[in-house]
Amino acid sequence: MAELLDESTSLESTTVGVFRTAATVKGGRRFSFSSLVVAGNRQGQVGLGYGKANQVPPAIEKAQKEAKKSLVRVYLQEGTIPHETNGRFGASKVRLMPASPGTGVVAGAAVRAVLEMAGVTDCLSKCYGSTNKQNVVKATMDALKQLRSKEEIAELRGVEIGETEVDERLARSGGSVWAKSKPKDNDASDDA
């Protein structure tokens, strides 16, 4: 379902939804269509577009152009997000949580479209409140915009980053953050 938008930057797009509205006029009903499209390069860039027209194909084209213009950079860490984050738009709230490698994207269709176009391969999500597709997609974009690296946070706070428990666990396990840490050796001489 994903279409290639631009060969030079390898942008892809996926249509989240096509919506039909009707205006009642003297001769009957006049239909118009709107389209919600998510575009991305699956490497940390993702954008959202919304287009309206009297036919479906022009509505999708307009949405793709808008999505291409509104690309934002998203900070990812080894296929997942670096920390838990919450996004909100209108009455929709979305919580995104990092997941261990191999979990996949556990999300509904609207959230999944945004995460996959951004390049997230492992993530857990939960939607609260309204599940309207437009608002859920915008809330997911809000959540992704809030992602920061450890270095950025340290710079904002004006502190130095020391070795954290996760870094130590990562070094011991040979690469997997989620490997269980070994218990520390208790000194037997303390008991005597």
Image (tube, rainbow, N blue to C red):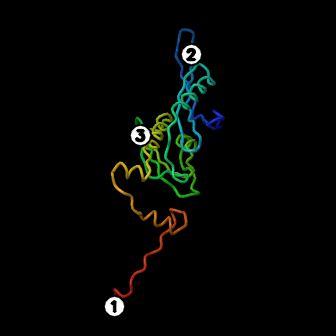
Residue 35 drawn above or below residue 41? above
Q: Amino acid at mark 2?
A: Arg
Position of residue 36 measured from the top left corner of the image (x, y, whole percent): 55, 31
Please name whichever residue, 102 or 56, is drawn nearer the observer in this view of the structure. Answer: 102
Q: Residue furthest top?
A: 26
Residue 25 drawn above or below residue 108? above
> In the image, which disc is placed on residue 124?
none
The numbered mark, 1 or 3, whose residue comes first in the sequence reads 3
Position of residue 85 measured from the top left corner of the image (x, y, whole percent): 43, 48
Task: Kindly indicate the quadrant of the structure image that contains residue 9.
Answer: top right
Q: Secondary structure at mark 2?
A: strand
Distance between mark 1 and mark 3 Cα atoms: 58 Å
The numbered mark, 3 or 2, whose residue comes first in the sequence reads 2
The numbered mark, 1 or 2, whose residue comes first in the sequence reads 2
Please name whichever residue, 43 or 18, is drawn nearer the observer in this view of the structure. Answer: 43
Position of residue 71 measured from the top left corner of the image (x, y, whole percent): 52, 35
Residue drawn 51% across the image and 52% down it: 77
Quadrant position of the C terminus in the picture: bottom left
Q: Position of 30 compared to 135: left or right?
A: right
Q: Amino acid at mark 1?
A: Ala
Q: Which residue is mark 2?
A: 30
Residue drawn 36% across the image and 57% down it: 160
Q: Which residue is mark 1?
A: 192
Q: Secondary structure at mark 3?
A: strand
Q: Which residue is mark 3?
A: 88
Distance between mark 1 and mark 2 Cα atoms: 89 Å
Q: Secondary structure at mark 1?
A: loop
Nearer the viewer's eye, disc 1 or disc 2?
A: 1
Please name whichever residue, 102 or 134, is drawn nearer the observer in this view of the structure. Answer: 102
